[in-house]
Image (cartoon, rainbow, N blue to C red):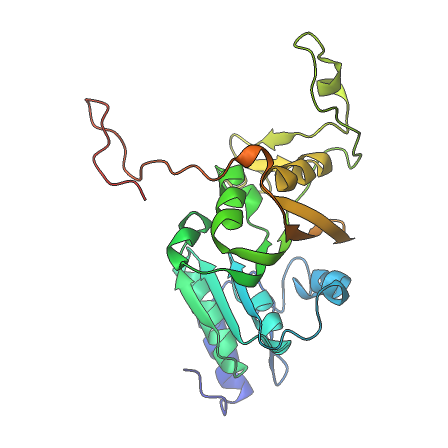
């Protein structure tokens, strides 16, 4: 646990030792975790554009932050009075940053090393689920949304994704004839752009949707879009899953030469 009586120089030294940071967090005393961030005051600048759309008072509520990174949003939820905040990330460096930032600010927040594909192991639903800046880093993005809907989303999903391509959203018919292919050429038709190698010097950027694409994916996973307070931010409520579909559960281990899986499915 970080000593809250630490001097600014102590905080600066500890923050630097945990760097580099992607979340620029104000630790107090003029100490920021990423003062030279290439995006400036990030994610604070984005948070201020949609903060008013979320409940100002989360007293008694539970919050799950999937892909919590350095803990900025988990801390923001605790500052609004959430009774329990759980942050998940699969990167131990980010978790160490998040624990340090939360402790430095005196917030009791739990952090676990889990990926979005592991949310079913939590065995509980949360009043608010944050899924910010994760989807485009996933090789299986629709599975991630399905798992969130099936296992942890109790009411409100706060979702953000990088978007590329057209921002137009055109009406889509319930069905099309096999020979009707014109809609696939329209800019506002739902689509995902696949990144085979790297984008923005990051090889973990795999799938980047256009606006119509991400809205369609959210609906297909059982989320009703309630508001879009910022260009990349969607506030969603849980809704029935179309066609009664749910998450798939592939085997964890790779098949042996006989084609049979060597491990248990979970």
Residue drawn at x 76%, y 52% as measured from the top left: 227
Residue drawn at x 41%, y 52% as measured from the top left: 120
Residue drawn at x 65%, y 58% as measured from the top left: 38
Residue 224, above or below 196: below
Residue 45 lies, in percent from the top left, at 72, 63
Quarter holding the C terminus is top left
Residue 222, above or below 82: above
Residue drawn at x 51%, y 73% as measured from the top left: 84
Q: Nearer the viewer, residue 86 or 242?
A: 242
Quarter holding the N terminus is bottom left
Residue 204 lies, in percent from the top left, at 50, 42
Q: Nearer the viewer, residue 196 or 11?
A: 196
Residue 248 lies, in percent from the top left, at 43, 36
In this view, which residue lies farthest toward the top?
179
In this view, which residue lies farthest toward the bottom?
5
Residue 236, above or below 211: below
Q: Nearer the viewer, residue 27 or 208?
A: 208
Residue 33 lies, in percent from the top left, at 56, 71
Q: Nearer the viewer, residue 218 or 110?
A: 218
Instruction: Tell me where residue 207 sits by quadrant.
Output: top right
Residue 144, above or below 30: above
Number of numbered callouts drawn: 0
Left or right: residue 251 versus residue 161 is left
Res 202 seen here: no
Instruction: Tell me where residue 31 sits by quadrant.
Output: bottom right
Res 51 seen here: yes
């Amino acid at each position: 646990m970080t000593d809250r009586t630490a001097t600014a120089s102590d905080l600066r030294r500890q923050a630097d030792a945990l760097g580099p940071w992607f979340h620029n967090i104000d630790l107090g005393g003029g100490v920021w975790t990423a003062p030279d961030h290439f995006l400036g005051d990030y994610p604070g600048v984005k948070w201020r554009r949609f903060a008013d759309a979320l409940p100002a008072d989360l007293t008694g509520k539970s919050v799950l932050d999937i892909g919590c990174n350095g803990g900025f949003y988990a801390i923001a939820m605790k500052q609004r009075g959430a009774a329990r905040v759980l942050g998940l990330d699969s990167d131990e460096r980010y978790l160490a940053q998040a624990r340090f930032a939360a402790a430095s600010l005196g917030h009791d927040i739990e952090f676990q090393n889990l990926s979005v594909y592991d949310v079913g192991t939590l065995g509980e639903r949360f009043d608010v689920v944050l899924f910010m800046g994760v989807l485009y880093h996933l090789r299986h993005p629709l599975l991630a949304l399905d798992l969130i809907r099936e296992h942890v989303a109790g009411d409100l999903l706060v979702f953000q994704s990088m978007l590329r391509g057209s921002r137009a959203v055109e009406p889509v018919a319930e069905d099309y004839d096999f020979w009707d292919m014109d809609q696939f050429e329209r800019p506002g038709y739902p689509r995902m752009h696949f990144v085979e190698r790297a984008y923005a010097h990051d090889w973990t950027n795999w799938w980047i949707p256009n606006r119509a694409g991400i809205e369609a994916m959210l609906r297909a996973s059982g989320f009703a879009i309630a508001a879009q307070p910022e260009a990349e931010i969607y506030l969603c409520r849980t809704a029935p899953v179309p066609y009664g579909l749910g998450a798939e559960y592939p085997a964890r281990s790779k098949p042996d030469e006989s084609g049979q899986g060597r491990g248990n499915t979970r």
